[in-house]
Image (tube, rainbow, N blue to C red):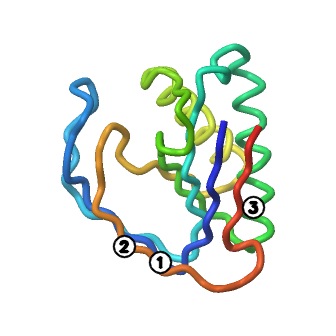
Amino acid sequence: MKLLLVFANKISYTPKIKNLDWVEDKTETETYENILVAFIHVEEKDMEDPKKSETNLVKNLKWAARKNETKKILLHSFAHLSESKATPEFTKELLDRAQTRLQNADYEAYQSPFGYFLDISMEWPGRSLARVFKNF
């Protein structure tokens, strides 16, 4: 799995192109402030041990959120960080489980629309640990 973790003062997105037939239709623009945005690339090897992959993902998200003094996390499937890719179904299930675990740990956890290309606008602060890359 590869994670690009970015703290955003503000992020807005609007779904533009649906690229998976089985996901629900989304058109609403969403805006969040003071939130950790997790660009998550789930790789084929992550399917070998789903529980381990989920635990590593949640652990890294909590760490980065603490370092950026936020309890808000946006999960965004971003299949552009590696050539290896897990199936879309596995990726969606993993993100759903991670979101539930974060919410059960008193985080505000959200997901961007899965299976869409989005128009995205972000404001990023220029400080240490506001941008972190993890590979596991």
Query: What is the quadrant of the C terminus in the image?
Result: top right
Amino acid at pointer 2: Ser
Q: CA distance from mark 2 to mark 3?
A: 21 Å
Q: Which residue is mark 1?
A: 10
Q: Which residue is mark 2?
A: 121
- Secondary structure found at label 1: strand
**What's the residue at 46%, 48% (across, down)?**
111
Residue type indicated by callout 3:
Ala
- Which amino acid type corresponds to the residue marked 1 in the rendered image? Lys
Q: Quadrant of the rendered structure where residue 106 is?
A: bottom right
Query: Could you tell which of marks 1 and 3 lies nearer the N-terminus?
Result: 1
Position of 107 with respect to 66 (left or right) is left
Q: Position of residue 127 (x, y in %)?
A: 71, 84
Residue visible at 21% across and 40% down? 18
Specify whether 44 is left or right of 135. left
Q: Is residue 7 above or below residue 90?
A: below
In the displayed structure image, the side of residue 84 where residue 114 appears, left or right: left
Question: Which residue does the numbered mark 3 point to in the structure image?
Answer: 64
Q: Quadrant of residue 6?
A: bottom right
- Mark 2 vs mark 1: in front: 2
